[in-house]
Image (cartoon, rainbow, N blue to C red):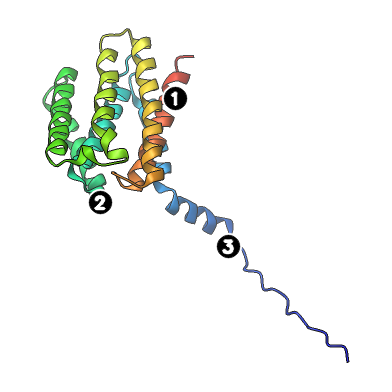
Amino acid sequence: MNMHTVTAPRSETPMAPWPVQLARTVVRRWPLLLGVAFAVFNLVTDDNSNALGGLMVLLVATTAYVVIASLDQPGWSWPVLGVLVVVIVAIRWLSENVVLELAVFAAVIIGSITVGLIRGLWKRHGIYRWQPFAAVGFVGVCLPALWLDPVGGRVLIAVGLIGHTVWDVVHWRRHAVVSRSLAEWCAALDLTLGVGMLLMLV
């Protein structure tokens, strides 16, 4: 006697309407979208005759990474960024001296490197040991931009921002030092702003 197995038809899960899919994507990729939006806002509102806007973004990002690393608290990523933004707004409210802003952030970076050294964090294997070198390197990009001509300064800062994008992606992939959402936000901001600054020179 022939036995035939009857296979029940597979039930396909209906696709959600496109507005629902779009909303899910926005919720899932909010750091990326927020970073791009912030970069576009910076490009539209910034003074294109100098590199100060991009310089401050690179400086804040660099400082945030080394501060969070020295604290060894990835969960504090966004609060640390918020505090740094408040600091830079307060400095600009008191004085428009760019050198003062650089001096304050350089002091924070040096202090963070010192704290990390005392705590032995820079002896760890992996990405931690590169934090002080990256901070000094990116600050080293910021300083010459102040004395170059406007075009040269913007090119240098744009290259620095694109370079920091690579640093962001490394942190995002390894899920280390900073929160993944901050690394994603920073990567989108740095890349969009860096490429945008270069395109505006063409």
Amino acid type, label 2: Gly
Q: Is residue 173 left or right of residue 178?
A: right
- Is residue 20 depicted above or below 52 in this figure? below
For the question of whether residue 39 can be seen, the reply is no
Give the percent coordinates (x, y) of residue 86: 18, 37
Q: What's under tag 3, amino acid-wise?
A: Ala
CA–CA distance in space, label 3 to label 2: 33 Å
Residue underneath mark 2:
75
- Most extreme residue toward the top, as rendered? 149
Q: Does the image show residue 29?
A: yes
- The location of residue 106, given as percent across then percent down, is 17, 25
Residue 57 located left or right of residue 198? left
Q: Is residue 27 left or right of residue 100?
A: right
In this view, 182 is above or below 1: above
Marked residue nearer the N-terminal end (3 or 2):
3
Three-letter code for the amino acid on which mark 1 is drawn? Gly
> Which residue is denoted by mark 1 in the rendering?
196
Who comes first in sequence, dot 2 or dot 1?
Answer: 2
